[in-house]
Amino acid sequence: MAEYLKNNPIALRHCLLFLYIRNYPVDDAYKQFCKTVGDDVIDEQDVQFWFNRFRQGVFDREEDKELWTDMRDVFRSDKYALRAAVLYQYLQSKHENLVYFWHSQCILVERFGANHLFFIHLGICNVFGEDVMTFPEFQFWFYRFFNGEFDLDFERDTDKKIYELLDMPLVVMKNILKNVNVFDRVALSQTCQPLRQFIQNQKLFLGTLEFKCELMGRLPAIRFTFGKMSSVYSKDGSNRMKNSDTENRDLDVPYWKEAFLDFKEVIRNPKLYLDELILAFRSEEDDEFYGFDVIDQLETALKSAHQLNVKKLIFKKSSTGAILKILPYVKPGYLTTIEIGLLFYKDVMSEEVFGMEQWKQAKYFVTRESDYTYNSCTIGSLRHFFHFKEFSVPFKELTVENVREMKEVLFKSPDFEKCSLSFMRAIDTSTIEREFGSTFAKNTCHYPISNTEYFEIKFFVRKIEVSRKKM
């Protein structure tokens, strides 16, 4: 390849221009070029010379050639220049050993999760424009270079069938997709409509998807986490995104807009299945700090998709207003668990939430009692929780009505198995003793419900635990 570029100075210059447009400093560009192509093709002084020329809008040596106001137009207007850029990307991926090969075909699975063929094509489009080269055209030239065919003047027979990725056996395509992480699936789905349809037709099982508004230092940021993979979108003077597998990159839009665009692309897959969806954001009072309305933007993103297949929905920090807006976009019946962390001061659980099918069909409801110790929030009547198999809820204090509901409704539920009730104030045991007609022995009471089962009630200073037991 070194000899080829020595004998093709224009192609060599196109490779240098490609590095220049990607904002490589001269010394880094020279090192990158030598690692990719070879040490004896060009010296650093020549790289400096051509970078200076490019900066002036000049591509050729002759002074009377046209000046370019945008050096990217060199590639946009010349298909041979664009092919040279693809050639350099192929050489770089080959040198870095990021692409595996199988039966003389580029199997689009990379070692580090981000630089597969689709990502390379997307990178070229990001540099020169989305319509500069179609994915099939890019794929054709990449395969030619892989097979050792470097003639940039070659013109293919347009009538000849060109086999593409989607022509591979279905089992091969599915195996390829198994090794592509969720971020790259988004990039892959944007290459062409057939690939998008293929991806969305494959079931995708993810453990945990977390959406989190957070602080990076003193600056606002949004983080998406999929298992060990994460992307952070932040405002650090400019809008930036950092993926766990790729370098930082500047964004052309506000950080939060890019974050929600990517979020929508992920959840838009109708065959996405999540074990957990975790939502963590600050109160609505912090919207001005983040620069957008968190809940409204999240609701807008969810509206663009189908109802999500989520087993466990977790609100780490939220408000009842957020729960009311988000819960309808989770598929009822598939959702088994609702978990709520910190609710804000004087928040009230809405009757509308209790009336939703998502709430009625869920089996488990969890709150973290420590989260409520200093938060005067209102959960509502115990009657709204009796359909759960298990639940834990906080109350300000134990009332006679609470105890009567336990005895008259909860203990008659065929599905109920156990619950934990925590209180901000110490429990008055006499209230329970009067309703149940017995005293607590060692803080425990057994309440029979049939010939074979009973409820065990354990009493603590600020908590009651109830569980169904066999005789």
Image: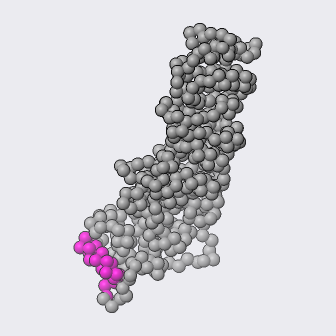
- Horizontal placement of 118 versus 44: left or right? right
367 or 18: nearer the eye? 367
Image coordinates for residue 439, horizontal then vertical, percent: 62, 10
Q: Nearer the viewer, residue 112 or 363?
A: 363
Name the residue at 59% across, 65% down.
Answer: 192
In this view, the residue farthest toward the bottom is 64
Whether the magenta-drawn stretch holds residue 47 is answered as yes
Tell me the residue at 31%/81% (across/down): 56
**Seen in the image, is 366 located left or right of residue 147?**
right
Residue span colored magenta: 43-62
Q: State which quarter of the image contains the C terminus.
A: top right
Q: Residue furthest right?
A: 451
Q: Name which residue lies at 64% across and 49% down.
A: 329
Residue 123 seen by the camera? no
Pick whichever, 174 or 151, lies toward us: 174
Confirm whether the magenta stretch covers residue 354: no
* Image height of 13 relative to 96, above or below: below
Asked if residue 278 is positioned above or below residue 453 in the image, the reply reads: below
* Looking at the image, residue 372 lies above or below residue 434: below
Q: Quadrant of residue 313?
A: top right
Q: Residue furthest left?
A: 45
Q: Quadrant of the N terminus?
A: bottom left
Percent position of residue 71, x then y: 39, 78
Residue 336 seen by the camera = yes
Q: Main secondary structure of the magenta part?
A: helix
Occupied quadrant, residue 96? bottom left
Q: Position of residue 43 (x, y in %)?
A: 25, 71
* Residue at x 43% of width, y 71% of height: 85
Location of residue 268 by image quarter:
bottom right
